[in-house]
Image: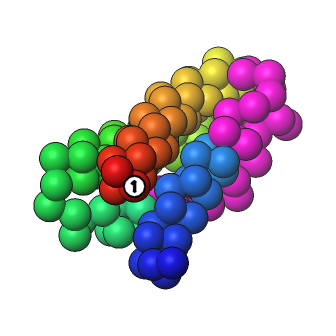
Amino acid sequence: MNREKVVFAFFIVLALTLNAGFVVGDVDNPAHHEVIELFLAIVVSLICTVLKFGDRSHLGALMLATSLVADLQLIAAASIWGYHAQIAAAGVTGDAMASIVSFAAGALVANIISVVLLVIETVMVRR
């Protein structure tokens, strides 16, 4: 068993599950979405991006692209949350939370594609 591949797959799946955990719940209810979970999703997603830099294959390039998309979406979600929590007079309203969750859902789609590509790569190696 290759420990490097295990760590790689672990972080990819962890990024997906953290992202999914954040997205689940009423879209416009801030009580259903934890800021710490969004923070952890961003941190793990950034770790995944760093881990994907070494792969020179075509699938590796696709996985890096999906990771960059997820990073961008999650950082946008955190930026919107930070703006509404710190600057906006109304605070984090239902409309703001719907925007935050929408960006996180986009990252979730990118993470799902990344996991599918990981499975494809694993099947190709087995042959």
Q: Which quadrant of the view contains residue 72?
A: top left
72 or 91, nearer to the observer: 72
Q: Magenta segment range? A: 20-45
Residue 55 at x, y percent in the picture: 22, 63
Classed neighbour count for the residue bearing mark 1: other residues with Cα under 10 Å, few (<14), some (14–19), many (≥20): few
Q: Is residue 16 left or right of residue 29?
A: left
Residue 23 at x, y percent in the picture: 68, 33
88 or 63, nearer to the observer: 63
Could you tell me the amino acid type at mark 1?
Arg
Which residue is pictured at 33% across the width and 68% down the height? 50
Q: Is residue 30 visible?
A: no
The stretch drawn in magenta includes residue 56: no
Q: Can residue 48 be seen in this view?
A: yes
75 or 4, nearer to the observer: 4
Q: In this view, does 61 lie to the left or right of 82?
A: left
Q: Name the residue under label 1.
A: 126
The stretch drawn in magenta includes residue 23: yes
Which residue is pictured at 34% across the width and 51% down the height? 127
Which residue is pictured at 80% across the width and 28% down the height? 25
69 or 4, nearer to the observer: 4
Residue 120 at x, y percent in the picture: 39, 42
Q: Which quadrant of the view contains residue 46?
A: bottom left
Residue 68 at x, y percent in the picture: 31, 48
Which residue is pictured at 83% across the width and 35% down the height? 32
